[in-house]
Image (spheres, grey):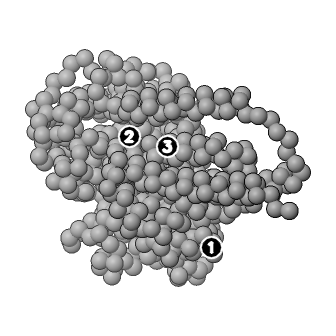
Amino acid sequence: MINKKRVMSTFLTFGIGLLVSLLVVFLLQWFHFQYDFEATLHFFDYKTRLNILQAGVVFILFLWFFFLTASTGLSSFLLLFISLLIGIGTQQKMLYRGEPLYPSDVYFLKDFGFLLEMVEIGIVIGTLVILALLVGSLILFFKKRKKRSVGRTEKVIRLSGFIITSGLLFYAYQFNQPGNLIRAAFNERTNWISYSQEKNYTENGVVTGLMYNLKSPAVNRPKEYSKEKIEEIYKKYAQEAASVNEIRTNALEEYNIIFVMSETFSDPTRIEGMEISKDPMPLYREWAERYRSGLSFSQGYGGGTANIEFEALTGISLEPLASNITTPFIQLSNQMKSFPKVTDLMAEAGHHLTAIHPYNTTMYKRLENYQSLGFDEFLFQDDMTYTKRIDENTFISDESTYQEVMDVMKQSDGKDFVHLVTMQNHKPFVHKYENVDFEVQGAPYNLEVAHYAQGIQYSDIALDNFLKELDTTEEKTMVVFWGDHLPSFYGEELFDLNGHVRMHETPLLFYTNFSEDSQSIGTISPIYFMNHVLELTNAPITPFIAMLERMEQILPAFEKGIYLERETELHYSRADLRPSTQLVMNEYDLILYDITTGKNYSKDLGFY
């Protein structure tokens, strides 16, 4: 006989679950739209079927909680709390970075204290209050919950339901694998935007965007991929490398090479629509007039340091990578050993490899990645001898990190490759310095820009002293110095006035203490830095570097959706590039697929 009470209870649970799932989808979109209620309503009206699909995925998670806890209320509460955390995360990241939350960002929970420093204090307090309410409610729930006997049938149903929903969640996690039926259902209702995840989440929804950014192959398989095609590309660039190497008479082992990626080092005087009382980096300009210099085209704005670092150390651009590969240092860390790397060239030349980062070991999995990159020594803040801060700045100063570099070089018997990632100018920017010598007008937060400029001035002085000290050393030394990205405090109006390209350009300098080359190289992507290192040292190149040199000649700077093709206008799509440029880029795609996802014939052939 049918138990009417049980049937009504089941219908009620399913009904509440569906409503809560729709509410979760609504809340996530509301956070993404920066609390714009009308925009969220419009999205629900315009994308009704897609939102039902998103709610269906969330409903599976609701059922998983229900079969685990046997409580409709508790399952609803847990689901809403998780959506609140995700919503706050994406709202804050959109506000400060201009990009949404990704599944891979869960890794940063290891640095929870660091994350708290970057989030608005009101948001932190609100979240903690809600968390306290959750914990209190859970304690109350379990205290007052009446114990009841659970029949065998109910146990079987709950266990079966838990297993089935676990399987469905795992299947949803395989969203980007070929043949996934959930992906197929979403494909009919979405217009995927691979070049901009901000637009992808806006157009297709936060739940959809999160699934789109789940694990997938690093590079989509090109149609032409085969062993024969890789061999053909290898032969082409091996010949070009051999031709170049006929006149490269020096060896890399004769030189110390130092990479300095300076945290948020940029030129505020380049920002149109804003006035600053004086130049915070006059000493840098003097060095830039004497040595090869230009601008680095940063993949990030307001953040993304590790992505710029990844490009500079591997020669692998994020542009050909699958659009859901947003942080290669995290998502591809287990493959790092098989990638082309600057460190491989340095190790072959007999350099002692040292990485210095005056912060902790966990951000962006740097310890694991530095190990995979082949560094002999890693110095983080707890390992450093020099740890001085300036005034109230909690981050180690640039001056101290440069002292650390000099110590490493003095203690080494042979030649060194030192890779330094500074922290002095990391946000927050205010309340760091006792005296601020700058005044700013025209920015959304003039005081913040003024404090930031003070930090840039300190960095300018520290760099000047560092290069002057290198001038006095006998060992031939080169420094590649660049800023990782601009700060994100300029606001939408100034960003639009200056344009995407300018707001992604940072200072770039190639200093040497053995020759002066005052060539201005314009704007280039970080994947090309090693081209200039090998040219200035007159050292031989590999076929992979020969490919990068050919690319730099025709496409000196690019990222997803932005292409600075030489002698043509700015392009926003690969399809608009010259056929000859597209040909070289297609070869690059093939090599990157081979390296990251394919059989890696390139490595066996000696391409890099």
Q: Please name the residue that numbered disc 3 is placed on.
A: 84
The image shows residue 456, relative to residue 53, as above or below, that is: above
Distance from disc 1 to disc 2, alpha carbons, whole Å, reads: 47 Å
Q: Are marks 3 and 2 in contact (CB under 8 Å)?
A: no
Q: Position of residue 463 (x, y in %)?
A: 29, 32
**Quarter that holds the N terminus:** bottom right
Tag nearer the camera, 3 or 2: 3
Name which residue type carries label 1.
Answer: Leu
- Taking the spot 69% from the left edge, 49% from the top edge, the residue there is 66
Per the model, the C-alpha gap separating discs 3 and 2 is: 39 Å
58 sits left or right of 558 in the view: right
Task: Report the front residue among 381 and 428.
Answer: 428
Numbered circle sitting on residue 260: 2
Residue 82 in view, yes or no? no
Q: Name the residue tied to disc 1.
A: 181
Within 10 angstroms of label 3, few (less than 14), some, or many (20 or more) residues? some
Marks 1 and 2, the one that precedes in the sequence: 1
313 or 432: nearer the viewer = 432
Dot in front, 3 or 1:
3
- For label 3, the SS is helix
Badge 1 crowding class, 10 Å Cα cut-off, few under 14, some 14 to 19, many 20 or more, is some
User: Quarter of the image holding residue 274?
Assistant: top left
Q: Amino acid at mark 3?
A: Leu
- Residue 283, above or below 327: above
| Mark 2 residue element | strand
Closer to the chain start, of discs 3 and 2, is 3
Measured from the top left, where is residue 405 in percent x and y?
A: 43, 31
Residue 475: image x %, image y %? 39, 36
Which residue occupies 48% across, 33% down? Answer: 127
Residue shown at the point (64%, 42%) measured from the top left: 74
Q: Earlier in the sequence, mark 3 or mark 1?
A: 3
